[in-house]
């Protein structure tokens, strides 16, 4: 069985992505099922075939064990790990379907805690599922150098911890400049190269704390670039072409081979003239960032001067 492990920080759009991916896969005739593994997710935007809340509910754990939301969520995932047979029995009923796992957004579950790593290991090694981790981070973090360095570090740590095929996406790219403008072009943030150019934007040189923070950030950037593992692809659930390209990357990562009817359905669903196939990054850059608008204005001004 093939599938996706959809992970990422809170608010990165995981459940929305799962709903959008289900709609897209259904449209290309791929039989899909969603497994909700977030015991705190009470407002699902999709129909799920398997729901962890049938096994354990976060609010009940908080009340009975007097735990806070974070501690209770860790307990729920450890409980699922101990009762992984329940999950296997539920998935066995979905034989032949393409699986989408919607995980909680608590970051430490994927950067240091053992439960989700153990779940991924059992599914990929013991059950022989071909799964790919789909890691979403909100694209608007690119507008803040401090936040961007943080999400890049989280992405790297998650990749090293889970040890599964992995694809990173900048989600909500259609809203990328909602909270500010990018310091550089979009490709700078997707390629994750030469991050040292962000350092001058980090802090006030006169503030002693800022100097220490700047030094720490320089070391983090050096570690990330030494590993040279992280890059991102832009993603917008509202763009069919974007979902098509996302699925292409995911299928390549987990080894899924499309059936002829799927390939034909994709061609019928997505316009060949969208402009996204050739360069997804360029498409988002031109449509959603100020850099392309500024370049267009400069070109217009230059053209008027030559007339």
Image (cartoon, rainbow, N blue to C red):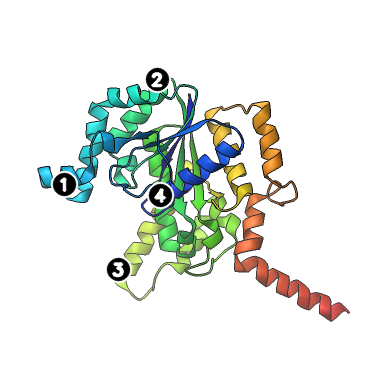
Query: Nearer the N terminus, badge 1 or badge 3?
Result: 1
Q: Residues within 10 Å of mark 2 (few under 14, many from 20)?
A: few
Frontmost of labels 2 and 4 is 2
Q: Which residue is at a point 32% across and 63% down the rendered structure image? A: 212
Q: Is residue 9 above or below residue 286?
A: above
Q: Earlier in the sequence, mark 4 or mark 3?
A: 4
Task: Give the Cα separation between the discs numbered 2 and 4.
Answer: 30 Å
Q: Nearer the viewer, residue 150 or 170?
A: 170
Secondary structure, mark 1, is helix
The outermost residue toward the front is 47
State the image coordinates of residue 75 (x, y, percent, origin top left): 20, 39
N-terminal label among 3 and 2: 2
Q: In the rendered structure, are the residues bearing label 2 and label 1 in contact, judged by CB atoms less than 8 Å apart?
A: no
Q: Nearer the viewer, mark 2 or mark 1?
A: 1
Q: Is residue 305 visible?
A: yes
Image vertical order of residue 302 relative to residue 124, above or below = below
Numbered disc in front, either 4 or 1: 1
Q: Nearer the viewer, mark 3 or mark 2?
A: 2
């Amino acid at each position: 069985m093939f599938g996706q492990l959809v992970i990422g920080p809170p608010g990165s759009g995981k459940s929305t992505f799962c709903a959008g991916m289900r709609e897209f896969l259904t449209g290309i005739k791929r039989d899909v099922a969603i497994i909700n593994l977030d015991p705190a997710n009470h407002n699902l935007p999709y129909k799920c075939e398997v729901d962890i809340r049938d096994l354990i509910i976060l609010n009940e754990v908080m009340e009975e064990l007097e735990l806070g939301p974070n501690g209770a969520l860790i307990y729920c995932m450890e409980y699922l790990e101990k009762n992984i047979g329940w999950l296997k029995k539920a998935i066995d009923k979905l034989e032949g379907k393409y699986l989408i796992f919607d995980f909680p957004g608590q970051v430490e579950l994927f950067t240091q805690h053992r439960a989700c790593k153990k779940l991924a290991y059992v599914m990929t090694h013991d059950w022989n599922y071909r799964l790919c981790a789909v890691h979403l981070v909100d694209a608007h973090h690119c507008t803040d150098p401090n936040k961007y360095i943080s999400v890049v570090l989280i992405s790297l740590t998650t990749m090293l911890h889970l040890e599964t095929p992995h694809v990173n996406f900048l989600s909500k790219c259609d809203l990328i400049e909602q909270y500010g403008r990018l310091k550089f072009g979009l490709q700078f943030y997707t390629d994750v190269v030469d991050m040292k150019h962000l350092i001058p934007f980090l802090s006030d040189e006169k503030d002693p704390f800022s100097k220490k923070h700047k030094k720490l950030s320089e070391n983090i950037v050096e570690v990330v670039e030494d590993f040279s593992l992280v890059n991102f692809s832009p993603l917008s659930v509202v763009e069919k072409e974007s979902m098509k390209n996302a699925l292409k990357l995911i299928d390549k990562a987990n080894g899924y081979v499309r059936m002829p009817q799927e390939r034909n359905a994709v061609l019928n669903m997505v316009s060949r003239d969208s402009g996204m196939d050739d360069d997804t990054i360029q498409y988002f850059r031109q449509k959603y960032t100020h850099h392309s608008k500024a370049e267009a204005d400069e070109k217009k001004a230059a053209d008027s001067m030559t007339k």
